Each structure stands twice: as structure tokens, then as C-alpha cells.
Amino acid sequence: MKVILLRFGELYLKGNNRNVFESMLINNIKEKLQGEEYRFQKTFGRYVICDYKPNREVDIVEKLKKVFGLYSISIAEEVDATKEDIENFIKNIKIKTENFKVYVKRADKNFPISSMDFAKELGGIILENNTNKNVELYQPQTLISVDIRLNGKAYIFDEIIKCQGGLPLGSAGKALLLLSGGIDSPVAGYLMAKRGLKIEALHFHSYPYTSEQAKEKVLTLAKKLCDYVDEVKLHIVSFTKVQEEIHIRCRNEFMITIMRRIMMRIAQKICQNNELGAIVTGESLGQVASQTMQSMTVTGGVVDNLPIFRPCIAMDKEDIMEIANKIDTYQTSILPYEDCCTVFLPKNPVIKPTIEKCLKEESYLNIDELVDQAMQTEEIVVLKRD
Ligand code: ATP
Ligand code: MG
């Protein structure tokens, strides 16, 4: 019988929490496979999906590849773990490449023959039925794996499909992603979700300075993230008034720094209102003037009691772009609609702002009132995976 074999990794490290993690992972798998017909089995360090409609196999694997906490998948033949049953299946294998190797692993040490000896024997059977093929022990083009498990079954497969890895979604809590229309922030959201964080998102727009399309673009990005995180509650806040006020009252080179500090204050409020335990941004050290150590000190400085996660901090743009391509956000991110940060952009933004100078600029503003006004413009859109 053909089955889909699932392997998970880091769950092993979690000691007493293991059960909680595991039930989250299983729930997330079931969530992802909603609408599919299948049977789910939990067996000795593996999960097995069986009794699915044969033509659904590829789709099921595609869906499972987006579940955090799964490390790899194999489409395998499940047979009874007897020498005869395994040999019978192996007999009919057709090797498509020039060479191959058989690898046997026994979780069941009572199996009557050692792994090495059995691998040799099975290799011999394959050779008999595949004349012109060779055994290649070091770099085989085809690796036939026989995994003999303690549930009385053996699994035979020739491919290991790599998955996301990471930790089950939700196992680390829930955070607020500052989502612009750019390349970096969707990647940041994905990377933190991979470490177990559910994601809500916050987007600032400056309508009418920014267009309706700029907002649409962010909705599209949030929707694309849903492939991995199932659901994104997107908070959309107007930043127009804040920007106008800063533009009128503060020194131009401080525009971005003060904007960022106000964004963070609003983000913190939204975290408090929605029980979110961290703020996530797409910042990368040195990428632009507002992403220096000093800038991050003063922007992070307005946030109390919440960590700010910046998973792209040490990454080169190329590496970020590679992930953006992988999660299919890149083509949307490069659409040329302006972000609120590009409106009123100063010619020479400060690179090393100090807290004293920020406070001085902010003394020309009524920060609490601006934050409250912005909060009143909050719209919420909930996006879900199709
Ligand atoms: P990105 O590609 O994510 O837009 P960026 O390289 O353009 O990043 P900045 O524009 O300096 O960098 O923004 C840094 C971070 O601030 C972003 O990654 C995002 O987390 C947050 N941010 C910027 N603009 C907005 C916005 N309009 N709404 C919400 N968050 C924003
Ligand atoms: Mg940006």
C-alpha cells in the first residue's frame, strides 16, 4: 500500500513540552489537509498518511511541505515487516538510473537479519531483475531505503522530500509583523512563523499620498503568507496625519526616525489590545539609513516589555530575495507602488540619531494625540488560506 511518511525533527528536543508540541503539529497537519480524504496514523517517531485518493498524492505533499515542524516526507510502500514481504516488493522495483544502493534501517532489532546483510541481499535481488545496473555504495544515483519500524511495518522509498523544518505554528505564541509593501517584511514574517509564531500584521498607509494599489499589494502579500500561517489578521492604520505633522513640525532629516518611533508606539498599542507578545520587522543592519544600530536603539527605545524580532538583521539582500522567491512574495513586493516611508522622504536622513535629539523633535508634536488619532483609523481585514 502506498502511504505518505512524515518525519519531524526538533520536537525531540522539547522534553516535557513534547506532547504539547506534538499535538500542535498534528492539529496543524490536519488543518492543512482539511477537505482531503485520508487516514492519519501516529507510529513510532513517524506519522503515516494513508487511504487517500491516489490522484491527491502530489497535492497532499505540496500542502504538507508548508507545515512548520515537518522535516521531510517520503512517498513510500508500506509492507508487513517480514523478510518475505520486503523481498517481494523489492523484486518488482525498476531502477531508472545507472546505479543504485539499498539502505536498510532497523528500528526493530528483533528482525532476523542484520541491516547490512539484508541490504546486500536486497541489492542482489534488484540486480537480478535489473540487468545492466550497478551497485554504487558511495554516490548512488538512486537510493532505495528500507525502514523497518516497530509497528510491524516496513517502509520502502527512493525519495526524501525536504520540508520547512522549524517548530509547529503557534508553539511560540503570537506576534505582530510590521508589514510594508517591500521585500523584507514578508520574509521576516515567514521566518518568525517558522520558529513557531502565529502572525498578525500591521500596515501603515498614507492615503491619498499612497495609492489604493499600494494597500491592495499589502493585502496580496498577507494573503500569500497565509499559505504558511493559515490566517493573518491585518491591521491597517492611516499614517497620513502623523506624517503631515512631522513634516510640518520636525527637522526634515529626522522625518524617518520620528515616523519609526511613532510606528513602534502604535504597534505596541496593537500588541496590547490583541495579546501579541512581540513585534517583528524586516530590518537588516546597514541596509538603509534608518537601519543602523543607533536608529534601531531609538526606534526600539519607545517599546517597553516586548521583544522586537528582526530575523533579517544579518542577511544580505540577495538571501532575503531568495526566500521571498521561495515563498512567492517577491513578484508582488517589487510592484512599483510607493510605501508610506517614501512619502516626504528627506534628502539626508540622520544615520546616527540620539535619543536626546529625538525627544527634542518630538517635543514639537503631541505624540499621544497623534497615536490615538491613528489608532482610530484602524481597519481590520482577516485573510485566510484558500
Ligand atoms: P521592506 O522591504 O520590508 O519594506 P525596507 O528594506 O524597505 O523593508 P524600510 O522601509 O526601512 O525597509 O522598513 C523597515 C521595516 O519597517 C520594514 O521591514 C517593516 O517591518 C517596517 N515598515 C516599513 N514601512 C512600513 C509600513 N508602511 N507599514 C508597516 N511596517 C512598515
Ligand atoms: Mg520598505
Image (cartoon, helix red, strand yellow):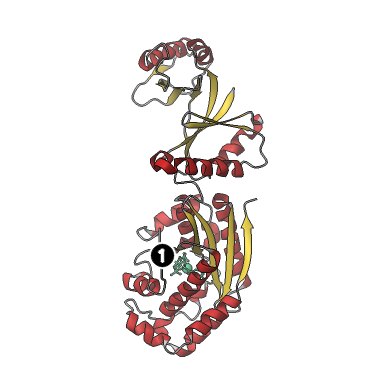
- Residue 76: image x %, image y %? 53, 26
Relative image position of residue 214 (x, y in whole percent): 58, 69
Check mark 1 vs ligand 1: CB closer than 8 Å? yes or no. Answer: yes
Q: Residue at x 47, y 57 (%)?
A: 187
Which amino acid type corresponds to the residue marked 1 in the rendered image? Glu
- Residue at 38% of width from left, 79% of height from top? 349
Q: Is residue 307 above or below residue 294?
A: above
Q: Position of residue 20 (x, y in %)?
A: 49, 44
The relative height of residue 155 versus residue 130 in the rendered view (above or below) is below
The residue lying toward the viewer, choosing from 78 and 376, is: 376
72 lies above or below 93? below
The quadrant in which residue 113 appears is top left
Residue drawn where x is 45% and y is 58% of the image:
188
- The residue at 37%/21% (across/down) is 136
Residue 343 located left or right of residue 119: right
Q: Is residue 383 left or right of residue 66?
A: right
Q: Nearer the viewer, residue 284 or 84?
A: 84
Front one among 263 and 331: 263
Residue matched to label 1: 283
Q: How many marks?
A: 1
Is 51 left, or right, of 352 in this rendering? right
Residue 254 picture location, percent across and down: 40, 82
Q: Quick one: SS at disc 1? A: loop
The answer to whether any part of residue 335 appears in the image is no
* Residue 132 figure quarter: top left
Q: Residues within 10 Å of mark 1 (few under 14, many from 20)?
A: many
